[in-house]
Image: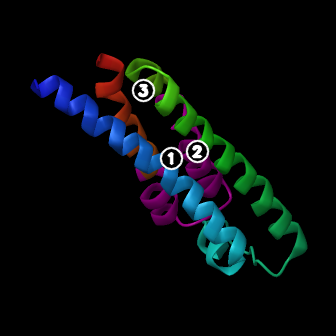
């Protein structure tokens, strides 16, 4: 197995872990909504029905994104997986911008959401090059 092939296999496995991780975090947050309180927007409490509804909308979006990546991982090419992963990285990047523009802590915005986007983009690169 060549170095490039190994890198593609590692990147594919990491893409799968990202997708599964997103779904797992959402399922956990759905079962225990208080754990989502630290998502970054100040003044949001999970006891507020409006916030809880917003979190459910975000959860549905995230689960759909994670499942889509898993389908592409199972049925697509490495290049397609990389392209989808790169496009999906816009979601946590957008979340980071929303947190910052809502007056949330930059540490949460960039440490949680921004780093997730960066990891997704970094994993996408070798897949796109495959």
Outermost residue to the right: 49
Q: Is residue 79 left or right of residue 109?
A: left
| Label 1 crowd (10 A; few <14 / some 14-19 / many >=20) | many
Distance from the alpha carbon under mark 3 to that under mark 2: 14 Å
User: Which span of residues is magenta-colored?
Assistant: 86-115
Q: Earlier in the sequence, mark 1 or mark 2?
A: 1
Residue occupied by mark 2: 66
Q: Is residue 26 left or right of residue 92?
A: right
The residue that appears at 59% across and 47% down in the rendered structure is 97
Secondary structure under badge 1? helix
Residue occupied by mark 1: 19
The image shows residue 93 at horizontal and vertical percentages of 53, 43
Residue occupied by mark 3: 82
Q: Is residue 113 visible?
A: no
Secondary structure under badge 3? helix
Secondary structure under badge 2? helix
Q: Earlier in the sequence, mark 3 or mark 2?
A: 2
Outermost residue to the left: 2
Quarter of the image where the N terminus is located:
top left
- Whether the magenta-drawn stretch holds residue 111 is answered as yes
Q: Is residue 27 left or right of residue 110?
A: right
The image shows residue 32 at horizontal and vertical percentages of 68, 78
The image shows residue 92 at horizontal and vertical percentages of 55, 47
Image quadrant where residue 16 sits: top left
The residue that appears at 53% across and 39% down in the rendered structure is 70
Image quadrant where residue 104 sits: bottom right
């Amino acid at each position: 197995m060549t170095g490039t092939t190994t890198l593609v296999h590692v990147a594919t496995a990491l893409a799968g872990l990202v997708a599964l991780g997103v779904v797992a975090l959402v399922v956990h947050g759905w079962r225990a909504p208080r754990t989502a309180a630290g998502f970054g927007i100040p003044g949001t409490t999970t006891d507020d029905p409006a916030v809880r509804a917003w979190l459910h909308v975000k959860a549905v979006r995230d689960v759909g994104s994670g499942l889509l990546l898993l389908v592409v991982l199972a049925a697509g090419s490495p290049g397609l997986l990389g392209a989808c992963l790169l496009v999906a990285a816009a979601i946590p990047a957008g979340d980071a911008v929303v947190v910052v523009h809502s007056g949330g802590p930059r540490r949460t915005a960039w440490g949680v959401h921004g780093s997730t986007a960066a990891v997704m983009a970094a994993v996408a690169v070798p897949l796109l090059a495959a």
